[in-house]
Image: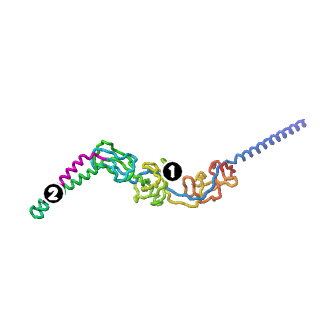
Amino acid sequence: MKRLYNLLLVFLFLALGFQASGCGGNSHSETKDEKEKLVVPVEIDIVTIGDIAAYFTGTATIEAEEETDVVAKVGGVVEKIMVEEGEFVKAGDVLAHLDDEMISVQLAQAEANLKKLENNYKRNKNLHEKQLISTEIFQQTKYEYEQQKATYEMSRLNLGYTAIRTPISGVVAERRVKIGNMVLPNQPTFKVSGMNPLIAVLHVPERQLGKLRPGLSVKLGVDAIDNEEVDGHIKRISPIVDPQTGTVKVTIEANDALGRLRPGMFARVKIIYDVHTNALKIPKDAIISEDRESAVYVVRDSVAYRQNIKIGYTNTTHVEILEGISSEDTVVTTGKGSLKDSVRVKIVND
């Protein structure tokens, strides 16, 4: 009986040994898998050196600096239209003609009366010098002559006004009359927009005013020309702050030598007020922002190290680095969300 009991104990110990051996093998396998999982695939980019600008951004609509409604100075029926929308006109060009028949008759009548009164004036002047008529009669004749002279000049001007002329050079933006229309004095007939220069007006918060000054460089991004940027500059800054909005009117002139801009286009405006040269820059995608602190993952020997940084100016693609990394470093741009400090990484881009 005792011998049987001893055999059972031996079998029990052997079974426990095999089980322990099996468990030890699994533990080794799992540790190996975990280590393999800790190699994180990432994309990296290098630290570059170059210029980076600080700028104020806003949106505005492109406008014409010079724009006017061309009005009819006299009433009449539209007889001829000389231009159409989209045509370029110079200051003084005729845009349309009104029927001038009635005004021509009035001018002829005024001219005839003027000649009659002019002869009377000359005759009475001679008689007055010889003291053959009184001063009162002479003065009355002179008054009637000068009054008729003014009437004639007015009729002559009205005849000239039947040709509707533009006061500025530009493009005919709108034609508001047709042949046969009756127009009244001071009625708008055309709209002319000057195409050079074109401007954009921003309303900038007064706290930003100290950074801006006339002449600063500006970039205008316009959707209508495939988001290409057009150069410009600040032309003038209003000296008055709007008390209701707390903003200042800033007028920007576009330098569009290719003539691609048009009044009414929507533009995203960047006013560049400072530039740092020879700055350390990294892509914005590399930045990790947490609790008002900024950090990046720097890759050295296939290991990613978390590094706190101090940033400066920021543009649409890059961030200036003031402290924390050097020009020899490479930083993680894609995959940083899966990283922890001192984790091994696999670089998947060149």
Q: Which mark is residue 316?
A: none
Range of magenta residues: 97-123
Q: Position of residue 85 (x, y in %)?
A: 38, 46
Q: CA distance from mark 1 to mark 2?
A: 72 Å
Could you tell me which secondary element the residue under label 2 belongs to?
helix
Q: Is residue 57 visible?
A: no
Residue 312's quadrant in the figure? bottom right
How crowded pointer 2 is (Cα within 10 Å; few <14, some 14-19, many 20+) is rated as: few
Estimate the x, y position of residue 327 in percent, counting from the top left: 63, 59
Q: How many marks?
A: 2
Dot 2 amino acid type: Asn
Q: How is the image coloured?
A: rainbow
Most extreme residue toward the left is 132
Q: Nearer the viewer, mark 1 or mark 2?
A: 2
Q: Is residue 128 visible?
A: yes
Q: Is residue 269 left or right of residue 72?
A: right
* Residue at the spot 52% in from the left edge and 57% down from the top edge: 54
Residue 161 appears at what percent x and percent y? 28, 50
The residue pinned by badge 1 equals 228
Q: Residue furthest bottom?
A: 130
Main SS of the magenta part reads: helix
Q: Amino acid at mark 1?
A: Glu
Q: Is residue 103 magenta?
A: yes
Residue at the image point whose x is 68% and y is 55% from the top? 300
**Residue 47: x percent and y percent?**
62, 56
> Which of the two labelled residues, at mark 1 and mark 2, occupies the earlier sequence position?
2
Secondary structure of residue under mark 1: loop
Residue drawn 79% across and 43% down? 25
| 156 sits to left or right of 296 | left
Say the numbered circle drawn on residue 119. 2
Point out the image quarter for the N terminus. Answer: top right
